[in-house]
Amino acid sequence: MAKELYISRPYLSTKFKKDTGTTLTDFILHEKTEEAKRLLHYTDKTATMFGAYLGFSSQSHFSRVFKKHIGLTPAEYRKKYS
């Protein structure tokens, strides 16, 4: 993103945190988990597919991030809300 905006990565991170109160990384992970919730709710595709689709390095990383932000594993979320 910084490259596209022609600014340095540290400046982008600092400016984003100052303007929003959250880190850019936390914001991106939050948005990815929100998209995962939509996918879990409206499709029958597997959580493994979502992890790869959303750019996580592994299924376990995706599951850890999802659980941290939502409080449930992807499977628990799907079972509870679908």
Image (spheres, rainbow, N blue to C red):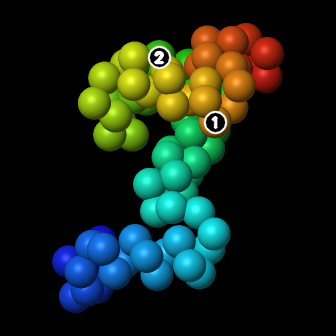
Expressed as whole percent of the image width and height from the top left, the position of residue 81 reads 79, 22
Residue with the mark numbered 2: 46
Question: Where is 28 relative to 17, above or below?
Answer: above
Any part of residue 4 in sight:
no
Amino acid type, label 2: Thr
Q: Out of 9 and 73, give the one closest to the viewer.
A: 9
Residue most extreme to the right = 80
Q: Is 2 or 17 nearer to us in this picture?
A: 17
Q: Residue at x 46, y 81 (%)?
A: 15
Q: Quadrant of residue 33?
A: top right
Residue 74 placement (x, y as % from top left): 59, 19
Q: Nearer the viewer, mark 1 or mark 2?
A: 1
Type of the residue with mark 1: His
First of labels 1, 2 by sequence position = 2
Q: Residue at 40% across / 71% down in the picture?
A: 13
Would residue 1 be found to the left or right of residue 19 on screen?
left
- SS class, disc 1: helix
